[in-house]
Image (cartoon, rainbow, N blue to C red):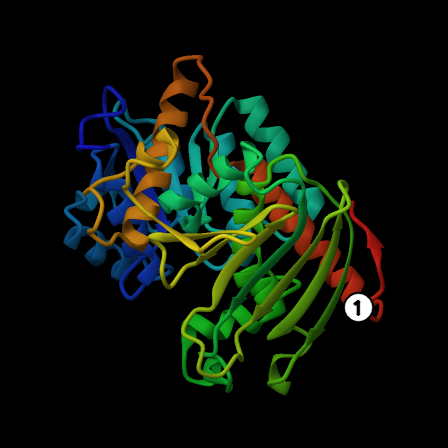
Amino acid sequence: MYYGEKKIEKPIRWAMVGGGKGSQIGYIHRSAAMRDFNFDLVAGAFDIDPERGREFGKQLHVDEDRCYPDYKTMFAKEAKRQDGIQAVSIATPNGTHFEITKAALLAGLHVVCEKPLCFTTEEAEELEALAAKQNKIVGVTYGYAGHQVIEEARQLIAEGKLGKIRIVNMQFSHGFHNVAVEKNTASTKWRVDPKVAGPSYVLGDVGTHPLYLSEVMLPDMKIKRLMCSRQSFVESRKPLEDNAMTIMEYDNGAVGYVWSCCVNCGSMHGQKIRVIGEKASIEWWDEHPNQLTYEVQNEPVRVLERGMGYLAPSALEEDRIGAGHPEGLFEAWSNLYSRFAQAMDACDRGEHVEFWYPNVHAGAEGVRWVENCVQSADQGAQWVDYK
């Protein structure tokens, strides 16, 4: 159990690009990063409007002279300071992620980036190579992976409790964009603009979340080929999709399904993952994030609860308040930011961490998956070899 004791010797001097006033995701980043005293927010380029960003930064207790008009200025000026930043989080529209991440790595900074990491596999591979060359950590905010029972699912599968895996059924299917909300909502408008959002909408925006959960739970299974069909039910969103179904074949003979959707009327969030083996199944639903359903054939259904002593030790390490108390998204993100901090600290000391976290390779795989899905869909939902 975690009682708030320090995980690293000194907090990492940290900045944000984006995440300014009105940014819900920016607040989540700051709350998660600073909760456990692993990061200290000392600088930022918070807004495309420099004055608005400066005023917002002051409200976050950031010194006015370290509230910068843009990320390029921030990286250059912070590099000249003895107490300059060591890491940066990027919470800007998708189309800027590649250039800012690349600039941060070249400036010698660790990075936490919103997904998608970039738009193309070539860009992703470039960032992977650059992170290795610069010996810097790149974390990607697949925030749902920080829920504790995801680790329990990983351990159950690793211990063979499910037997050979046959089916992985995934979805992230909400209904909040069942009409053209982007006409009146700036935070949605850019998500359906290919110039800013990239080659997909829901595949990249929501579909990659349960896909990453499957990668955490099933690290040894690799996609062999896939087929994707995508639709734009709200016509103005074309060529980007608001609904997609992807079928995948894995190298061990298993099959997977991902339903990515924002027009599932009435659904609040609709993110689920069900892993089906030859002996048993597990299921996790993010609207009930503290429970993992474990179903053995011909036995009563078990609901495994976060924080209980019967869970694997690794699933209890990041428990914060004991069993019975509900934990949510902020705790999940805090767990990931704690992992990011420990990985960054170890990297700076020339060491390597053994635990998993959504790293630059995970970000690259999300980009690769979207690219393959788009290729299949645009070829009339044909099977494509995964590459």
Toward the top, the furthest residue is 350
User: Which kind of residue does numbered mark 1 sit on?
Assistant: Asp
Residue drawn at (46%, 18%) of the image: 352
Q: Quadrant of the N terminus?
A: top left
Residue placed under numbered mark 1 in the picture = 378
Image height check: is 201 above or below 278? below
- The x, y position of residue 35, in whole percent, is 21, 41
Secondary structure type for disc 1: helix
Q: Is residue 186 left or right of residue 52?
A: right
Residue 278: % across, % down: 66, 47
In the image, what residue occupies the spot 73% across and 55% down? 248
Is residue 58 left or right of 335 when viewed as pictured? left
Judged left or right of residue 250, residue 116 is left
Where does residue 250 sit, x and y in percent of width and height?
A: 74, 46
**Does residue 250 sit above or below 181 in this rendering?**
above
Foreground residue, 251 or 190? 251
The number of discs equals 1
Instruction: Identify which residue, 295 or 165, lies in the foreground.
Output: 295
Q: Nearer the viewer, residue 127 or 80?
A: 127
Q: Quadrant of residue 14?
A: top left
Q: Is residue 135 above or below residue 299?
A: above
Q: Indicate the position of residue 221 as horizontal and vertical percent values.
A: 67, 39
